[in-house]
Amino acid sequence: MATQGSVQQSGLSTSSTVPNTTSASQQQQSHPQHQQGVSTEAKFDNVAKVKGLIWHLKEDFANVIKVAAANIYHNSSVDNGMKTGDDTPPRLDKSLEEVFSICNQIELHLKTIQECSLQLRDSQQYLPLPVLTTKTDVNQGPTQDTTLSYSQYLATVKSQVAFAKNVQEILMEGARKITQNE
């Protein structure tokens, strides 16, 4: 069970949740350039991944219901003496494992979405000015009142990292003094 979780966290799945490749290849043949652009965007879009996994979850949940119904029918037929216990119905635990696998993948993507939104919020709070992405700056002064140059951004990040290190050192020294006084 632990290996399944580690496989799922790496983005791989051991269940049959892979979309139908024949329809995807047919779509790519009809619009190859458009599909390629969409696939690269969807590759990094966790919301699109969750939407796709919801569809697979719906299908697998319907499969769980079918397997459960088949198991109930089989067990009742065996109990009534209509069938022997030799033929085995589909396994319910395998179907449930597929559903739980998809749920774990959805949870992972939702956590990633939450972390990204928290990082965006913190970025907007602590560095509300947009940064110019050009690395070469002709002038080292402020470019505009509403943007930071790349070198100004680097200086800001370096000062924030230095401040965080100083706070960590102060806390560590305070913890050492407390443990020495005890």
Image (cartoon, rainbow, N blue to C red):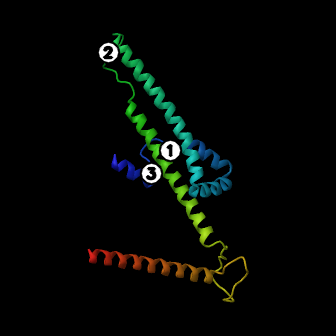
- Is there a contact, CB below 8 Å, between mark 3 and mark 2? no
Give percent across and percent down for residue 77. Answer: 38, 14
State the SS at label 3.
Answer: loop
Q: Residue at position x 36%, y 10% from top? A: 82
Q: Nearer the viewer, residue 93 or 18?
A: 93
**Three-letter amino acid code at disc 1?**
Val
Q: Compared with residue 73, is residue 169 higher up or lower down, i.e. above or below? A: below
Mark closest to the chain's N terminus, 3 or 2: 3
Mark closest to the chain's N terminus, 1 or 3: 3
Quarter of the C terminus within the rendering: bottom left
Residue in the foreground of this view, choosing between 78 and 155: 155
Residue 84 is tagged as 2
The residue wearing badge 3 is: 12
Q: Is residue 73 left or right of residue 142?
A: left
Q: Residue at x 57, y 58 (%)?
A: 44
Q: Position of residue 136 (x, y in %)?
A: 64, 84
Q: Position of residue 139 (x, y in %)?
A: 69, 89
Indicate the quadrant where residue 114 lies.
bottom right
Crowding at dot 3, Cα within 10 Å, few <14 / some 14-19 / many 20+, comes out as few
Question: Secondary structure under badge 1?
Answer: loop
Amino acid beneath label 3 = Leu
Q: Give the tally of numbered discs.
A: 3
Q: Find residue 18 and name its label.
A: 1
Q: Are marks 1 and 3 in contact (CB under 8 Å)?
A: no
View extreme (front): residue: 181
Kind of residue at badge 2: Thr
- For marks 3 and 2, give the CA distance: 40 Å
Q: Residue at x 53, y 35 (%)?
A: 59
As drawn, 151 above or below 72: below
For marks 1 and 2 on the same chain, the one whose residue lies earlier in the sequence? 1
User: Quick check: marks 1 and 2 in contact, CB under 8 Å?
Assistant: no
